[in-house]
Structures are given as structure tokens and as C-alpha cells.
Amino acid sequence: MGELGQAFRDVWEYVGRTDPYWGVMSYPDRRGGRWDLDEFFAYGVRDMTFVRNLMESRGVGLGDRVLDFGCGVGRLSRVLAED
């Protein structure tokens, strides 16, 4: 890994350890552990509702399996698991 790649890795490792929710949804006013978990996960519901509506408007549906690649703390996976 090059020097720049290592620098990015170091930053993301740090963010993952110290402020993981902000690392997923980087709203300036939530930095420093200021995400309320219920609010954070509610954004996942909101975002998946938007994605589903967008897919349906284009005639695309979800199958029985979904891959949430790079799922972080599971904000979107939790919503998909409810179906």
C-alpha cells in the first residue's frame, strides 16, 4: 500500500474507533459522538424508503438476497433485515 493509501487507512481506522456513527453519516453538527442512536438508525429507514421508491419507479425490485457491501454499523442492513 502506498503512503497515501496508508494515510487514508489510518484516518478511517481512527474514525471507526472514535466516532463510528459520524464516520458513516458525516453531518458536521454530529461530530464527536453527538449522534442519537435512534435518530441515526431512523435515517437508515428514511434512506431505504427513498431507495425502494426509486427502484419501484424504475420497475426494479429486491430479491430474496441483498448484499450490503461495506455495511459499517448496519444502518441500512437493519432495515433490509426487517423485510
Image: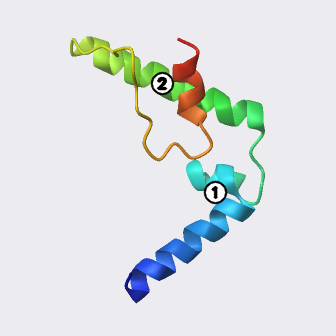
Element type where label 2 sits in the image: helix
Q: Residue at x 71, y 63 (%)?
A: 17
Res 53 → quadrant? top left
Give the class, few, some or many, for how many residues have Cα within 10 Å of label 2's Cα (few <14, many ≥20). some
Residue 14: percent from left, percent from top: 65, 70
Element type where label 1 sits in the image: helix
Give the class, few, some or many, for how many residues have Cα within 10 Å of label 1's Cα (few <14, many ≥20). few
Compared across the picture, whether 61 is left or right of 8 comes to left
Residue 1: percent from left, percent from top: 39, 81
Q: Residue at x 50, y 81 (%)?
A: 7
Please say if 66 is above or below 1: above
Residue 56 or residue 30, whichever sits in front = 56
Residue behind mark 2: 48
Compared across the picture, whether 28 is left or right of 54 comes to right
- Could you tell me the amino acid type at mark 1? Pro
Residue behind mark 1: 28
